Image (tube, rainbow, N blue to C red):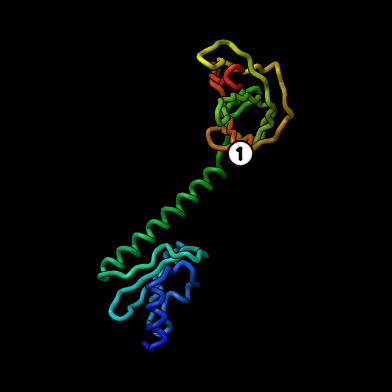
Amino acid sequence: MNREDKIAQRVMMAVSPYTFARDFMIPKSVKVTQIDDEGTGADIKTWEFEGRLMGVAYFGKASKPLWYYRFTNESSRRARIKDTIENLKSRIKFKQDRLDERRNFQHTLKVGDILTGSWGYDQTNIDYYVVKEVGQKSVKIREIGSKVVGHGSGTDRVVANPNAETGPVMLKRVGPRNGVKISSYLWVYPWDGRPQSETDAMSGH
């Protein structure tokens, strides 16, 4: 290894590697071993520098490494590489399973079903929606009102009022557990018919 490479390597080990391109991580004069990623998309390289066992791992196009280590022995380096690949395989499988679940999901909602959800930061609001039309992957729903059937401490006990349609008809895709996303802060799910508690008017509703 020439003097320039030694200086570059020492600088690399003294500062955060996260601010440099991948090529900067490894001196040009060392022999680099590219590790088989086993289909994970990982970029794992090992090398030796002045008797030190080095290694670095990236995933995808990220410029920040998953890890960058100096290992005490070869067995620990192999173990780290194995764990990295197995963890990435698990991550990829999890994402693929979720994707397959969304693709293959078949909802069971029917026309007339009522969906409900709650929202609010310093108070609880209960919203209801009725299913107006059913498709294979989506439904058309419309917001409906509610009516008070009881009271608690600072709360009203409310149920859906299907006769009070208040909002426009919306086409929405149905997700797992027959959930429908209304907005960034509200998902609605099939209502079980029981009264629900929301903040009453005197308490801020």
| Residue pictured at 41% horizontal, 69% vertical | 44
Please indicate whether residue 129 sits to the left or right of residue 91 in the image. Answer: right
Is 26 placed above or below 139 here? Answer: below
| Residue pictured at 30% horizontal, 67% vertical | 78
Secondary structure beneath dot 1 equals loop
Splitting the image into 4 quarters, where does residue 88 fall?
bottom left
Q: How many marks?
A: 1
| Residue pictured at 44% horizontal, 65% vertical | 65
Q: Position of residue 22 (x, y in %)?
A: 48, 72
Q: Position of residue 7 (x, y in %)?
A: 39, 82
Disc 1 marks a residue whose amino acid type is: Ser
The answer to which of 163 and 68 lies nearer the viewer is 68
| Residue 36 in view | no
Q: Position of residue 34 (x, y in %)?
A: 41, 74
Splitting the image into 4 quarters, where does residue 3 fall?
bottom left
Q: Which residue is mark 1?
A: 184
Image quarter in which the N terminus is found: bottom left
The answer to which of 44 and 111 lies nearer the viewer is 44
The answer to which of 9 and 118 lies nearer the viewer is 9
